[in-house]
Amino acid sequence: MSEPIPAVLIVLPIVAATVPLAAGLVRDRVGWAIATLVLTAEAALATVLAYRIYVDGERVVHVLGGSEFGRQEVEFGGVTSEFIVGIELVGDALSGLVVLLIAFVSLGVLAFTRQGGPRSNAFYSGYLLLAGGLMGVPLTGDLFNMFVFLEIVGLTTYALVASSDRPEAAVAALKYLVIGTTGASLYLIGVGYLFVRTGTLNMVDVSRSLAGEPGWIAGSMYGDPLVAAGFGFVVVGLATKAAIYPLHTWQPDAYAEAPDGVTVYISALVSTVGAYALARVTWFVFTPEFFVVNTLVIEAVLVLAGGSVLAGSVLAASQRRVKRMFAYSSVAQFGLIVLAIGVAVHPAASEQATRFAVYGTVIHLLGHAVIKGGLFATVGSIAEGTDARMVREYAGLARQRPFLSGAFAVLGFALVGVPPTIGFVGKWYIGLSAVESRLWPVVAVVVISTVLSLLYMARLLENLYFDTSTVTTDAPGSQSTDVAADGGGANGAEVDADMTPRKAAVGTRPPYGMIGLALVAAIAVVGLGFVGADLTTALDPVVEAVIESSPEVTP
């Protein structure tokens, strides 16, 4: 039976994206109200979908055009097989959590943009379009349509990054456009290679064809060089979307130069869906059996991810501008997630190691989205009324902003991995999976990254709470050493279209919505840490599917 909920979750925000533009012909600034209404409905639908998946134990499937149209007999490679011809949308134990995350983060960030901006109707049209593209990535069961949704996400993100008045934002958006389009093209080449070999784009059917299951194309294709090349192109493309070093260069500029509200949104979700896509394809399209035949391939993935963790951590520790520091931190954190993805399918991994790796991947993916979105919300709120954007400008601000400083400390400890936060739970399972697999270099990377993240968070917190020195802001237009080191404008301050610094009213309190989002994120990372056991229970079907390499239970 074809269920409508997955389709509605994607179509509703995409169609609704036209409404703010149309309404703008009659009235200015109605976009926020329209976006709030639409995303409230999205959150309700995502909750219903999660109930069906995790409580009723269902796999919710929608085939565009109906189930009779969707599955047809096709002759390919001398074998007649029953392929999915229509586009399949699937909600399962892996995608359900990501759908919930997207729905509630998209709704929650509106509390920040209500006053923090941007506030134009065109901005909220792009915001809703981005929400629809984000929803499509976890719900699609088709490799080509995953590319389509990733491109919707990319194109709308480019526009949102460029929505700032600062010329640096336009440059950052252009850089993101070039690198992001290159990554998407590489992913599409890999999908093309897989289509040439299997004759299908549906994830279940590609997996079955590669495995050479009875009734499908005869013989396993895991040793086929074209299949291995397809995996390589797909991984590089998705690693670019997830900002894995050295394919990360778009991310620091995009996060640092975008308006604060945009940074909160994209830092929580855009690279998250790229990492999700990599986990989905690695675990359920290629499956662990592929990596038994191609051990060097998974070793290369682990080396790439480990390098991203170390490089991102070192670069984050060397930054003076706070937004760039956390941007490089994301490079390290997504490297950790890709490490866990690789450990889950590594030939050395036992069933227990695979279980821990799957837990660590998904929990750290969800936790990092909340942590990083909350940190950027806190940074934006602190900047409102203080104009503090550099590490040295945080000196003594805890006295002026006690609640925001408290939220900042909690979220910072979660980023480091201090219990009982969700950041600790994710890192704990990733570390356990590496120990269980006896992959000691991975264990060392996890430990070193934790120490380095503690280094730069301690520097920030020391300035915030214990440094009471008075900071003198550089004169407008001056070129300080911070500019050369961090690549931002003078002191990282926002500037107007005429290039004059935009001065905040120093001493004014940030709007309640901005403060509230930061506080809710801080509470959430602690609360999620206490429900880690429930999250692992929800992920047990995913674990069993990876262990058994059974494509029937996954899209």
Image (cartoon, rainbow, N blue to C red):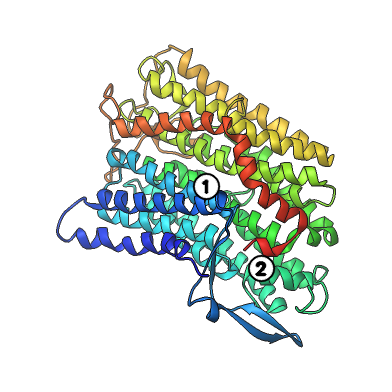
Location of residue 105 by image quarter: top left
Label 1's element?
helix
Location of residue 274 by image quarter: bottom right
**Which residue is disc 1 drawn over?**
251
Which of the pair 270/495 is nearer the observer? 270
Q: Estimate how packed mark 1 is, as few (under 14), some (14 to 19) or many (20 or more) residues with alpha carbons within 10 Å.
A: many
Tell me the quadrant of the picture where the C terminus can be found: bottom right
Question: Tag 2: residue type?
Answer: Val
Please name the residue shown 26% across and 44% down the image: 498
Question: Tag 1: residue type?
Answer: Gln
**Cα–Cα span, label 2 and label 1:** 32 Å
| In this rendering, position of residue 400 left or right of residue 67 | left
Which of the pair 14/73 is nearer the observer? 73
Residue 33's place in the image compared with 190, above or below, is above
Residue 342's place in the image compared with 264, above or below, is below
Please name the residue shown 57% across and 70% down the image: 144
N-terminal of the pair, mark 2 or mark 1, is: 2
Point out the residue furthest to the front here. 56
Q: Is residue 439 visible?
A: no
Please name the residue shown 71% across and 77% down the image: 198
Rendered image: mark on residue 204: 2
Label 2's element?
helix
The percent coordinates of residue 399 (x first, y second) are 38, 14
Q: Estimate how packed mark 2 is, as few (under 14), some (14 to 19) or many (20 or more) residues with alpha carbons within 10 Å.
A: many
